[in-house]
Amino acid sequence: MPQLAFAADFFDEYENLEKTVKQGVREAMAKFQKLTAAELTADKGLHLEQLESARDPRIRTIRVTRFWRGVVLAPDDGSGTYLLLKVLQHDKATSWARKRVISVNTATRGLEIRNVEAIEQLTPVLRKAADKAPALLFADHSDTVLRDLGIDDGVLPAVRTITDKPQLEAFATLFPEDQFEVLQYLAEGFTPDEVWQQVVAIRRPADVAAGGPTGDLATAITNTPSRITLVSGPDELQDILTKPFDAWRIFLHPSQRRIAYRPSYSGAAQVSGGPGTGKTVVALHRVRHLLDQSDDARILLTTFTNALADSLRDSLALLLGDSEGLDRVDVTTVNALARRVVADHGPVPKLVSDNDYHTRKRWQRIAKRLDLPWNEHFLDLEFRHLVLAQGIGSEEEYLSASRAGRGAALRTPRRVEVWRAVAEFEGSSKRTASAPTSSSASGPPNYWPRRDRGTATSSWTKHRTYIRRSGACSAMQSLSSPTTCSSPVTRTNASTTPACPCAPWA
C-alpha cells in the first residue's frame, strides 16, 4: 500500500481552509490509506493527474473539492510514498505545481523544493547587474566548495549573481531551504568547515558514504523530518487532520520532551536541529519546566523580532493556561531588552541600522582614501561583529583579538590597515554623533546587572537566534543565575550539549 507524507507548508495553511475544503482533504487523504497505486491513478473522484508543461513530471494534482486542488509528489521509483505539498484553489494549485522542481540535496540528502521558473527568470537580470558590481557576496568560495555544501547546478548560477545580503534574502522563498541556509551562514562570515558542522552534518544521515548516490524518494523524505511528516496509518492520519492547530504549536515528541524537561544542565545548553524541528516548542516547554521548579522563578525568553515575540507569548499562554505563570516570564527581543537596560541608566543614544546608507558611504570613502583592498561591507562587519562585539578599544587589542567566524585570516600588516580605517571611522562618528564607537559599545560597566548585585531573572532561554557577538551573549548571561541558565537555541533533533553562551548560535 502507498505511504502518505505531508509537507510542513501544508500544515501552516490547513487551519485556514474552509470546513468543506478540510473535509475534502480528509476524504482524499483517506484514499491514499486504502487504495493501491494503480487504484489511486484510476480513481475518478481523486483525479490524480499529471500536469502538462510541468517542470517536474512527478508532480500531480488531486481533486479536493470542485474548486480546490491538492498538489502531490508522486513516486517514480517504486517507493510508493506520496507527498502532499499544497492545497490551493484550482488555478493557483496548477500554477504553483508547474513552476516547482523536487530534488534531493547532495549534502544533507534531504528533499528540497524550488521555484525553478522564478530562479531562471531572475538570474539573467541579476547577472547583468553583477557584471558591473565591485564585488560578489560569494566570490571567496569556489564552485567546488559550494557544491560540497549542497549547492547544486540549478542554484549555483543564481548564487554567482548575488552581490549582498539583502539580495540573498530576496531568494529566500525561491531557493531550497537547506541550500539557502548554507548561503546565509557563508554570508555571515562562517567558514565552509563551520557551515558543514553546523548546517550540513547535523542533517546528513550518519550512514551516507561520501560521494554516494542520493537515494530514492522515500529515503529522501525520511531524511527530511524537519519539513516532512510521514503518516504511519489511518489513526495517525485522522489525528493529524483533526487536531487543532494550536495544539500542534505546543505538542512535544518524546525526544523533545527529554530535552525540555531534563532536571538541570551544568551551565548553558545548546539544542541543535534543522528548521521546523521544534526548537520553539522545546524553548516554551523549558520555560514551563523552569517555572515549575520554583514559585518565585522569573524567566527571560528572547528572540529577534517583535512578531516572533508576540507569537511566543500567545503560544506560552496556551501552554501555561494561567496568567500567574505568564506574569513571571519576560518575552522580548534582544534589541528591546538592550534598549530598556540602557534607558534605565540614562538617555538612549541614537542607533544606526546594519544597512544604514550614510554609514556605508562613510566606509566607502575611507576604503578609497586609504586604498584598502576591502569593500565597505567587509569593513562594516569587521567593525560591528569584532570591534564592537568584543569591546576592542585599541590597536593592540585588535591585533590580538580572535576573528573566529569572520572568514579568511588577516595577518598583522592587514590588521593594522583595518585598524587605521576603524580609527578614522570612529573619529568621524564622534564628530557626527551618528554611529556607535568602540569606546561606547560596551556602555558603562554598570549597565548590565551582575549576579552578585542580585537580579530578578533566574533563567534565560534564547529562541532561534543568530548571535555571533560575545558582548551580547555575556550581557544576556549576566542577567541569569549561573545554576539555572538554560538556552534551547537552535535545533531539537540532535543531542543537547553544554555550550558557551558566547559560542556561535545558528
Image (cartoon, rainbow, N blue to C red):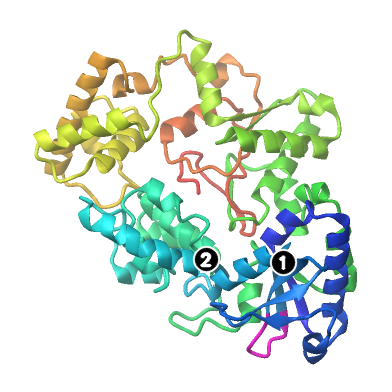
Picture residue at 86% right of the left edge, 78% below the top: 31
Label 1 to label 2, Cα distance in Å? 19 Å
Q: Residue at x 89, y 65 (%)?
A: 238
Q: Which secondary structure type mostly characterizes the magenta part of the structure?
A: loop
Residue 485 in view in this figure: no
Q: Position of 384 compared to 498: left or right?
A: left
Instruction: Name the quadrant of the N terminus.
Output: bottom right
Q: Nearer the viewer, residue 14 or 316?
A: 14
Whether the magenta-drawn stretch holds residue 215 is answered as no
Residue bearing mark 1: 90
Instruction: Give the residue pinned by disc 2.
Output: 115
- Residue 18 placement (x, y as % from top left): 84, 54
* Residue 76 part of the magenta-drawn span: yes
Horizontal side of 120 relative to 15 (left or right) equals left
Instruction: Please state the extent of the stretch shown in magenta in the rendering.
Output: 74-81
Q: Callout 2: 10 Å neighbours few (<14), some, many (20+)?
A: many
